[in-house]
Image: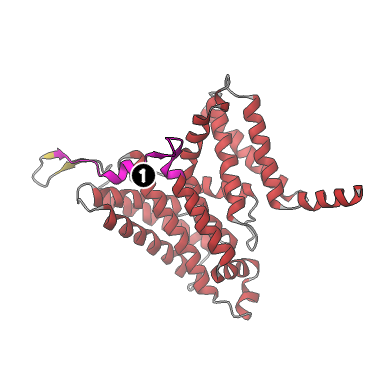
Amino acid sequence: MTRGWRAALGEWWATPVARALVALALMLLIGCVFNADGAFFKWSVHRDMLRQVSVYGILACGMTVVIITAGIDLSVSSILALAAVSFAWLTLPEGWPAALAIPAVLVIGTALGSVSGVLAARMRIQPFIVTLAMMVFARGLAKVVSGGMKITNYVQEPDGTSHLVPMPRIFGMIDSRVLGGNVSIVTVIFLLCVLATWIILSRLRLGRHLYAVGGNEEAARLSGVPVARTLVMAYALSGLFAAIAGICQAAQETQGDPETGMGYELDAIAMVVIGGTTLAGGKGSVVLTLIGVLTIGYLQKILSLNAAPEATRLMLTGTIIVCAVLFQRGR
């Protein structure tokens, strides 16, 4: 009986989910110890943490899909910025209703992601190079759309005059809270993105194809998997999620900033990897990414509550990411 229990525990411990949960539990334990005079035990702290990491988490959903195919997407932060600028431009100076502006922005993000996928799948260019180029291109396009300035509700006319336009209701709706003010809408959007990603990876044929391509591209091709189409879909989904994150970012900042989201792609990659999804492709899940998002989110919140200097936060975050990856691999 004892041996059976130990064997079962050993098998559970060998799973990525178990290791990711232990890392998250350890982070929560650290928060309980360094609780900033009890601040860590208040729900408002956890609510604000979830709100702060939700945009990163939305990006991480798309990044999970791409990494499962053994790829990488460095362009998500720039597509986020372009989406934020486009959404602000369409809804503020142009006065588009949200019902038209949101689909238009989502199409832009999906299209740019698809371009990266076509270049990687059809032209056989390394995903790192393709998405690096797209990162630069999308950031430049965001600056072209915005004229190099933040787009706010302070609109300047061609004749040089300027005036304030009412802030569209959609901005307040996205940045509001539900359930008695206990959960932010952007957090709900993040969780819906997690659910959508889980359905894609676990319940659809596309998900099986994504895992097959990441596990062994040549074997997948010989098995009849449409490899090129699958890769294009992976990067298109990443672009779509980046556009969703950009809309949320614009609503939270009440403006479209072409410089927003700098470095967000690194945080998204870290959240995917720290959860246990392997960069080699073929393995992983959005559930692991969700755990990684919470782990990084609590790390940042604990450091913030304890007034850790920015330099210390960066160094400690980098160290913990490396340790977490080694912890995941130590089987």
Side (left or right) of 99 relative to 67:
left
Closer-to-camera residue (54/155) = 54
Q: Secondary structure at mark 1?
A: helix
- Residue found at the very far top of the displayed protein: 37
Q: Looking at the rendering, which quadrant does residue 135 occupy?
A: bottom left
Where residue 302 appears, as percent x and y from the top left, is 57, 30
* Residue under the point 28% across and 52% down: 98
Closer-to-camera residue (316/297) = 297
Residue 69 appears anywhere in the view? no
Q: Looking at the rendering, which quadrant does residue 203 occupy?
A: bottom right
Where residue 74 appears, as percent x and y from the top left, is 49, 54
* Residue under the point 37% across and 55% down: 138
Closer-to-camera residue (329/284) = 284
Where residue 287 appears, as percent x and y from the top left, is 60, 52
Q: In the rendered view, would you say 152 is above or below 198?
A: above
* Mark 1 burial class by Cα count in 10 Å: few <14, some 14-19, many 20+: many
Task: Point out the stretch of residues depicted in magenta.
Answer: 163-187
Where residue 194 appears, as percent x and y from the top left, is 52, 53
Closer-to-camera residue (155/254) = 254
Please name the residue that numbered disc 1 is placed on: 174
- Residue found at the very far left of the displayed protein: 159
Amino acid type, label 1: Ile
Residue 107 appears anywhere in the view? yes
* Residue under the point 88% across and 52% down: 4
- Residue found at the very far front of the displayed protein: 180
Q: In the rendered view, would you say 227 is above or below 270?
A: below
The verdict on residue 159 being magenta is: no
* Residue under the point 38% across and 49% down: 246
Number of dots carrying numbers: 1
